[in-house]
Amino acid sequence: MAETSAQRALAVSLGARSDDELARLFADRHVSPSATWRDMFDAAEALLEPVSVARALPALTRRESDALFAALAGTPATGDVRDDLISRALVGDDGLLFPSVADAVREALPDGVPAAATPSPTPSAAETAAASEAAFTYAASVADILLQTLEAPLGRIGSGSLGATERRRLVDAGAVSTPADADLLVGLAADVGLLGANDRAWLVSSAGREWLRLPTLERWQHTAVALRDALPRAYRSADGGWIPVDEWAGATPFDPEGADRAALWARRLRRWGLVDAAGRTAPWAEPLARGGDVDTSALRELLPPEVDRVYLQNDLTAIAPGPLAPHLDVRLRSMAVRESRAQASSYRFSAASIGAAITAGETADSLRDFLSGISLTGLPQPLAYVIERTSAEHGRVRVMSDPATRLTRVVTDDETLLRSMEIDQSLRSIALSRTDDDELVSHVSSDVVFWALTDAHYPAVAVDSHGRPRALERARLAPGSQPAAEPADVYTDLLRRLREGVGDSDAAWLERELDQAVRARAVIDVTVRLPDGSARVFRLEATGLGGGRLRGRDRGADVERTVPLSHIDGVTPVG
């Protein structure tokens, strides 16, 4: 009886809510938009089912969990916490638990909410220095991950995480030191929007591409704020910051995975230099932890100064005498392979790396100007020779689209190259065929043909209809994220059906009670209003319901009775 009363109370409460409030409730409780509920009573019954309640508890914060146990002891929830719990359909308008919620709370935490952790003391100078080093190191690691992903997307396995091959690839490239860091930093980059995903791979987002062009401190700052804003609700403080990291493990008492999730987020903040190894907030992150912005001035003093010059050497290497400014590092790595990364990084040039830069849009002049501008030692003759020779060789094969035939044309003056491309088995996918004009044509798009030739090490250049070289961007970026649909839009059909099923709530509830009694063949006391205005109670074994009438066997007179629903004033279960 208590449960049916709770269902009716919740149904009345649901009926009084706006569509937006109902939609947020359904979203919070993970209700399927295709639920077949007919009215608010169906909704209330489903939301109070033990399975549904148990699914709702892990999302509760510690304050909300404490309020549930207080309500369990008879002290109603109050204030904002009461409003939050009412909005999640876990307590009634009086702040007390619904019976099924009380049962679920007792079953989930029979010993109550565990005690909160004791806050850690302020970090020492050495611990602060270690946090600043982490900020610098892992900002560089995320940049390396993005650059590796621009070269080739990072494959994902069925669970959505990195595959073992991709972890090893990032370790071998020097982007991370361990496979565990690969998982951690890719997850971090995804949660702050630097990476996006399709079904099979991680891709750099447009925001990630812009992030790579920022100075180190700005990279770090943007990500620090995004990390704070991405924290789970239970870890956030009322002022918009975060509660002490020590409290995260117990921040969602009903969640069996709460400790693991807290450990993951704590590791992310440690890697980003926002907290130290003990979880204490770093000095520069204290304003961020209070809901404000990060104090970059405090961190800037501890970061190693960046350099904007390198030593170019005769052995085709470049040595940066300190951390190279990010925008210079990104461009230098488009024309040279980084061989080591430390406080001083080294880069190696080759005909292949210079050719890749020219393919991406550089010219001999732009390469010379850039390298001369950042060199402390001028432009060494061996490097100048590689640039000249590669530039001269590059472009001997021209790839263009023919608007008249809609074919891709491959043109070269070198007969040897022409024959080689014609019979090259590695180019079978683009199906090149020779014309009477000693050109090769393909039905495949010009961009695909160009990259196939480039991968096969032919000196190809893409040109437009006027014969001018055009730069092609090979990197695939993650598709722009679509704004999440508003809950009210997601649940439009369900909300309309519930509103249409409201009608006379008292009559609907009565019919619902009688239907349940008939299904259970239950014995009920039915209060019937007689024509003279008096009322009489009949004890019936409910046997049927239809046509606006209840049928049942009268236990006292041992006869079948049929009672119009419009004459029934009340129903009470017996026994």
Image (tube, rainbow, N blue to C red):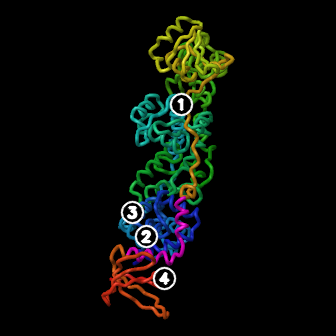
From mark 3 to mark 2, how far is it between C-alphas?
19 Å
The amino acid pointed to by label 2 is Phe
Q: Residue under label 3, please give it.
A: 51
- Return the residue nearer the eye: 487 or 537: 537
Element assignment for label 2 = helix
Mark seen at residue 518: none
Asked if the residues shown at circle 2 and circle 1 are in contact, with their CB atoms under 8 angstroms apart, the answer is no
Residue occupying image coordinates x 57% and y 8%? 436
Is 42 covered by the magenta stretch? no
40 or 299, which lies in front?
40
Res. 140 in view: yes
Residue identifier under label 2: 69
The reply to whether residue 383 is visible in this rendering is no
* On screen, residue 537 above or below 480: below
Residue 405 relative to residue 337: left or right: right
Q: Earlier in the sequence, mark 3 or mark 2?
A: 3
Residue at the left extreme of this rendering: 558
Mark 3, residues whose alpha carbon is within 10 Å: few (<14), some, or many (≥20)? few
Q: Which residues are magenta?
A: 493-516
Residue 566 marker:
4
Q: Separation of disc 2 and disc 4 at Cα?
A: 42 Å
Depth check, front residue: 426 or 215: 426
Q: In the image shown, does 376 or 83 lie closer to the viewer?
A: 83
Give the residue at x 58% y 21%: 446
Choose mark 2 or mark 4, whichever is in front: 4
